[in-house]
Amino acid sequence: MVKKKFAETPNFTIRKDFRPLDVKEKGLVFVGYEISDDKKTMNQFLHYDQLYTIRHGWNSPFFIGLLEGKIMGTRCPKCGDTWVPPRTHCWNLDCNLQRTEWIEMPKKAKVHTWTVAGWSGRSSLKRLPIILVYGVIEGSKTAIANELHGVNPWDVEFNMPLKVVFKPKEQRIGAITDWHFEPADEWEPSPMNKEKERIKKLVEPVYEWVKTLK
Amino acid sequence: MSRKVCIIGGATTPFDYGPTGFESIEGGAAECVREVMRDIPDFNLRDIDMMIYSHFSVHFGHQLSAEWIIHDHLGLVGVPHYRVENGGNTGGSALYAAALAVKSGQHDVVGVIGWETMDSVSQSQGSEFIALASDIRYELMVGGIYPIYYAAMANKWMRENKVTEEDVALIAVKNRNNAMDNPKAQWYRNEHRYITVDDVLNSRLISYPIKKYDCCLMTRGVAFLLVTTEEYAKKVNPDHYVTIDGMGLSSCTIRAGDRLNFPGWIERYGPGYPEMTEFAACRQSAEVAYKQAGIDNPLKQIDFGEIHDAFSTSEAQIYKALGLADSENIAQFIRDKETYLEGSIPMNPGGGLMGYGHPVGATGLMSAIEAYYQLAGLIPKKHLSSKTQVPDPHTGIVNSHAGTGTSISNFILRRV
């Protein structure tokens, strides 16, 4: 009997594996324990490592776009609203979940809001301090979060013009970290002021602390 | 006319990071129920006709359906149960579910148990687990943790509302110092000291303008809350029950950057709101709760609150979303210490997330329990002294909050 297929199986012909050598899948492993000296309390150590497949499906054009150095957004053919990050169906209730169309977005943006991080998740600690901005890419109705490079943490400004800068093609992995924001070419930082001095004072120990990380 | 819903009792384990004395979740849950049994001698486990479990992340416990362990440990086989998960608003959402169950007439005595064991991984790994509730495809790798998203929202909000780092530090100081009167509070049990605005300003940078002491704590803890009909309340605990006179639950975008021009908000509140700065889901759920409870001037008609101070900045943003102040007077409202114990509307007299702790699934329940204690006059019994008892309160607000303001609930509790 021929098994009935309900969806086309994509034929995956391009596959890249850039898993670091020290990342290994072991599944669930009990790897140790500790017991208090009064023998009343025990802690056990469980290690869990698992490879996940994130199926991007209909959102794939955005991530394939990243590999090609493009910011892909979507637009509703009915109301014209445009988004990055993309939405595959319109958010406007009057459009009745209209399917959207893909468009390439300009690599120009503006800072909507920003922060300077001196602490982060385990995998980002060594990159601190990080300037995170929510930038509105020209034409988009939404802001997208990404890092701002090429500027001192204390020099970021609201509404400053930005450009989207991609990593060299060979370094891209199809993730949001394939690009970052940089100040637009015409932008110049404003002179130091009280707030900038305050941020500088808060950030300086972070540079020192990061040097101590292994 | 639907039935009145009451809170008649509740208790938490001590909140802590590391050993609490109640390491197993089922042991902790049992001890919370035992405390409620001591408070209400006529309450019997056989009276419970439904259990709702409140737990955020399987990543911390590494146990799927952990509520099943707790449930049969309590001896409750046969009693219906399910788990509610709604990010940081898990506790509030579980309370909402329990109240709906009683209101509907389907159930009379509903137990709610919440927990989180955030110390099972390192702090930075824990932060990253929580950040899995951001949209991991677009945001996880470029912010990494929630404080960064909150800092970006707060930075703009503070500028637009002329609120300074010193102003929000007053909130961080208030909640931690309130916790010094609460023996179950993590701040009391760990750092155990009174702090000043300078301590907050000099603490390490997390993400500008948020420093370490502007942030809540990561916590291991369990909470139990008993939600019942008024008939049952009058039968077993006639002198110490409160009614839920209003409740609202609302939602906003997962990614904060998506709410700038969202049609659903423009329809309700006009263009330019909530921007990336205001908590629209807090405003809307409060409006619903206020209407049900007949509140048109919250500052005058509410005596105190237990609210979701994940960050000192977000507590300030919540004041505004609850309608206690507006852009013109929010900074002065904070500077006048209106939310201190001696102010017009004390907020987080129990210590809040910054003082008591934030074991996500238990947090909203902890807030409801503290509000219940205040209204039932139980603070002198449950805290170390009467100094954190709000004088003669009639009406309190409980607020629970998730994501970047993605799900928010508000409850109006009243003394009978």
Image (cartoon, rainbow, N blue to C red):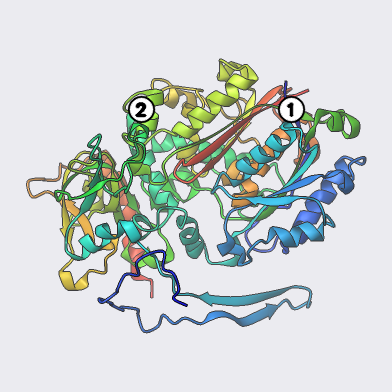
User: Which residue sits at x=38%, y=64%?
Assistant: A7
Residue B40 picture quarter: top right
Pinpoint the chain carrying mark 1. Answer: B
CA gap between label 2 and label 1 equals 34 Å
Residue A129 or B277: which is nearer the viewer?
Answer: B277
Which of the two labelled residues, at mark 2 and mark 1, occupies the earlier sequence position? 1
Q: Amino acid at mark 1?
A: Thr
Helix or strand or loop: what does disc 2 sit on? Answer: helix
Position of A92 with respect to A79 (left or right) is: right
The residue sitting at the right extreme is B42
Pinpoint the chain carrying mark 2. Answer: B
User: Which residue sits at x=89%, y=47%?
Assistant: B46
Q: Is residue B387 visible?
A: no
Q: Amino acid at mark 2?
A: Ile
Q: Position of residue A82 (x, y in %)?
A: 24, 41
Label 1: few (<14), some or many (≥20) within 10 Å? many
Q: Position of residue B306 (x, y in %)?
A: 62, 35
Q: Position of residue B311 (x, y in %)?
A: 49, 43
Provide the residue designation for mark 1: B243
Residue B118 or B176: which is nearer the viewer?
Answer: B118
Label 2 in the same subunit as label 1: yes
Helix or strand or loop: what does disc 1 sit on? Answer: strand
Q: Indicate whether A184 appears above or below B99.
A: below
Provide the residue designation for mark 2: B266
Position of B89 with respect to A193 (left or right) is: right
Position of B116 with respect to A117 (left or right) is: right
